[in-house]
Image (cartoon, rainbow, N blue to C red):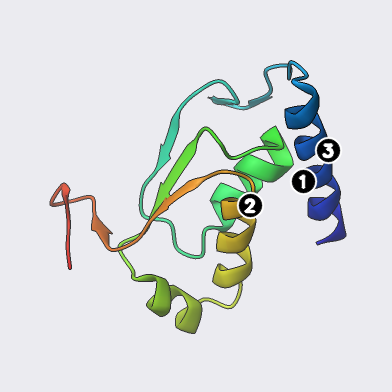
Amino acid sequence: MAEIAGIYKQQMKRKRSNEVVKEKWAKHYSSNHHILLVGEGDFSFSVSLAIMAFGSASNIVASSIDSYDYLIENYKHAKANLDILRKFGAQLLHVVNAVKNEESY
């Protein structure tokens, strides 16, 4: 968690100084791509990609078929992962059924 806090502080410094951030790659993913992640469980893949690979999540939209409350109750690390993603600028969507291509309530 301390490592993630350090990355967050660096990101905030860059934003304040308008520093140009070099494009980063993680296999097929680039920090310059707009990335949609569908069917996340505890959002650990999103955190890994955003924080460990890019140092930012502003280019990521991550979704889950489960509600926020269900995630928190059933996945041990979901709350922490969601909090991290929110701080790093990800857009998070819950109760999204990608098979039906619509939000289900």
Identify the residue at horizontal 60%, vertical 26% (top origin): 31
Callouts 3 and 1 close, C-beta under 8 Å? yes
Residue 67 at what x, y percent from top left? 34, 71
Q: CA distance from mark 2 to mark 1?
A: 8 Å
Residue 6 vertical placement versus 40 (above, below): above
Among the 4 quarters of the image, the one containing residue 65: bottom left
Residue 23 vertical placement versus 59 (above, below): above
Residue 6 vertical placement versus 82 (above, below): above
Q: Is residue 6 left or right of residue 54?
A: right
Give the residue pinned by disc 3.
Answer: 10
Among the 4 quarters of the image, the one containing residue 21: top right
For numbered disc 3, what is the local secondary structure?
helix
Q: In the image, what residue type sits under mark 2?
A: Lys
Callouts 2 and 1 close, C-beta under 8 Å? yes
Q: Is residue 41 left or right of residue 83?
A: left
Identify the residue at horizontal 55%, vertical 48% (top origin): 46
> How dense is the environment of label 1, judged by Cα within 10 Å: few (below 14), some, or many (20 and up)?
some
Give the residue pinned by disc 1.
Answer: 8
Q: In the image, what residue type sits under mark 1?
A: Tyr
Residue 63 at what x, y percent from top left? 38, 53
- Residue situated furthest front in the rendering: 16
Q: CA distance from mark 3 to mark 1?
A: 5 Å
Give the residue pinned by disc 2.
Answer: 87
Q: Is residue 1 left or right of residue 75?
A: right
In primary-sequence order, the first of circles 3 and 2 is 3
> How dense is the environment of label 2, judged by Cα within 10 Å: few (below 14), some, or many (20 and up)?
few
